[in-house]
Image (tube, rainbow, N blue to C red):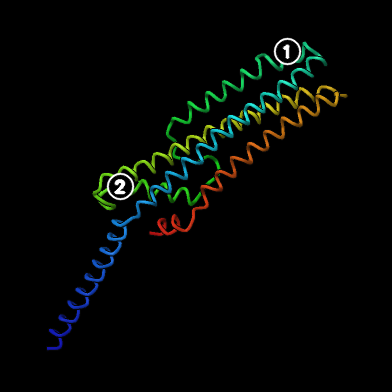
Amino acid sequence: MLYKLGLSLAAALCLAVTVAHAQSADSVADKIANFPTRFFNKISGKTADLQQQLNRQTANYLRRMARQEEKLKARLYKQDSVKAAALYPRDPQQQYAVMLQKFQQDSARVFTSMGPEYLPRVDSLQGALGFLTKNPSLVNANPALQAKMQNALAQLQQLQAKFQAADAIKQYIQNRKAQIQQYLSSYTNLPSGVTNAFQGYKKQIFYYGDQIREYRSELNDPDKMMQTALVL
């Protein structure tokens, strides 16, 4: 009798655990199925806005750096035209125009990283979108919602490409700064115009790098709605 009672109790406990687990799974499934449409709209809007800003700022900074190099080139040619010609085999305006064109072309590629700096929330966001895209039945059978979800992931990947292309520009201008600095170190006394032009060039490099860091930080700091969605 006790043996049968024990078996009945064990069976009841197993049934209770199974029901609780099923209810929990159903609850999670319901939450995922009701994933807010505005969440995907928010991601698409946020990333599109940052892409637009990064495009505009990159174009502006490259033009400013080109003007700074033009000033520096003019002053260095007055100092020593032969040595300056070696530092400027190409016209600076043309050089930076080529960089801008490459930035626009490279940003059409797909990357899976935001660059050397690890962004944990962005990584979680990409993982969530990737998971939902591979498992569309978990979200909703609505084709419109599926399209919004896929667009959100595509926008995030495109922004990743923008950041990678911006990092390539930043690396180039850092190398260029080192070349100019090495060239200037061969002179003991430089006119103030040369020094000022180089300082202006270095400022533009700093501002551009700082702007990229700001955009990354903004993307890595989601609002309350995104935080809730990532927890889910």
Q: Pointers 2 and 1 in contact (CB under 8 A)?
A: no
In the rendered image, residue 156, in percent from the top left (x then y), is placed at 43, 41
Residues 89 and 54: in front is: 54
Quadrant assignment, res 79: top right
Q: Which residue is mark 2?
A: 145
Residue ID at (55%, 36%): 54
Quadrant where the image shows the C terminus? bottom left
Write down the residue under mark 1: 85
Of all residues shown, which one is farthest toward the bottom? 1
Seen at 71% across and 35% down, the residue is 203
Q: Residue furthest top?
A: 82
Question: What amino acid is found at the position of numbered circle 2 in the picture?
Answer: Leu
The answer to whether 170 appears left or right of 144 in the picture is right
Please give the name of the residue rendered at 27% of the width and 53% of the height, measured from the top-left corner: 138
- Residue 136 pos. (x, y %): 27, 48
Mark nearer the N terminus (2 vs 1): 1
| Residue type of the residue flagged with mark 1 | Ala
Seen in the picture, residue 177 relative to 1 is either above or below; the reply is above
Quadrant occupied by the N terminus: bottom left
Where residue 178 sits, quadrant-wise, is top right
Task: Identify which residue is drawn at 17% across, 83% down.
Answer: 6
In the rendered view, does 66 fall on the left or right side of 221? Answer: right
